[in-house]
Image (cartoon, rainbow, N blue to C red):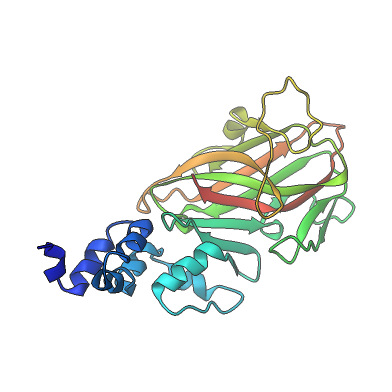
Amino acid sequence: MNPFTILPEGCISEIISFTTPADAVRSSVISTGFKSAAESDIVWNKFLPSDHQDIVSRSVSVVVFDSKKDLYFRLCESPILLDEGRLSFWLYKTNGKKCYLLSARQLTISFSDTQLFWEHTSDAESRFPEVAFLNSVDLLDIRGKIGTRALSSRTSYAAYLVFKISERYHGLESTNAMVRFVNQESEDQAEERATTVILAARAPRHLKASLPEKRIDGWLEVGIGNFYNGALRDDNGDVEARLLDSRPFHAKCGLIIEGVEFRPI
């Protein structure tokens, strides 16, 4: 006799809640009893972030769901906009880890308040109301910052610039990229270990650098850097992803920024 068949449904749910979302889905096909236990709110509440109610309450539109399982997959498959549309949130489907895309309006971009250099405009392919369009600058300095407590703990993350290139662009062949914990490392220290990324196609062949990749949403992304987010009790403060090209007399134009993304790796 299978010992699980004599356990109360609540006990089975508790056991399944210590597995993974994929295991829970597989368990639901074993039998009618397992299906009910595997789809219970006890299970899926464990897979959702502990602060999911607060996150959902910040959505710019009402998030409709019938159960905690329904909410889990709703957040995996359809990112929601938070904080007046400046931030996009979703869950990594395999493990429920938190993902964020900071909009261009949520970033710190040098000279972005001057229309001569940058414009904030709409883009039909963007999930945000506005993107940032680079008219022309010499100093390209883009920073995306997020509190580590907003991210999933004990998780390795990568930061990406999400962008496009206009038909007429210039000076985007080589940019320094770095990620740092703001309260643990100075800007100078981070710059010393920066890597090189390529934003546009016209790049020197001899240059060792990360190249952009096409995303399924039609945008490009390039990795800025990786980091490990430890336990919440070891609060690391803010983590900052930064792109910097400070070459003098080297004009840059034609970059379209949707945002900076933080997602698990």
Q: Nearer the viewer, residue 154 or 265?
A: 265
Q: Is residue 182 shown to the viewer in this render? A: no
Q: Residue at x 55, y 73 (%)?
A: 58
Q: Nearer the viewer, residue 218 or 190?
A: 218
Quadrant into which the N terminus falls:
bottom left
Q: Nearer the viewer, residue 175 or 22?
A: 22
Q: Position of residue 140 (x, y in %)?
A: 77, 41
Give the side of residue 76 with respect to residue 200, left or right.
Answer: left
Q: Residue at x 87, y 56 (%)?
A: 115
Q: Residue at x 80, y 57 (%)?
A: 113
Q: Is residue 240 above or below residue 193?
A: below
Q: Is residue 218 above or below residue 37?
A: above
Q: Residue at x 73, y 50 (%)?
A: 109
Q: Is residue 53 shown to the viewer in this render? A: yes
Give the side of residue 102 with respect to residue 98, left or right.
Answer: right
Q: Position of residue 92 (x, y in %)?
A: 48, 56
Give the side of residue 185 with respect to residue 254, left or right.
Answer: left
Q: Residue furthest top?
A: 206
Q: Position of residue 263 (x, y in %)?
A: 53, 50
How many numbered badges does the structure rendering display?
A: 0
Q: Is residue 92 above or below residue 224?
A: below
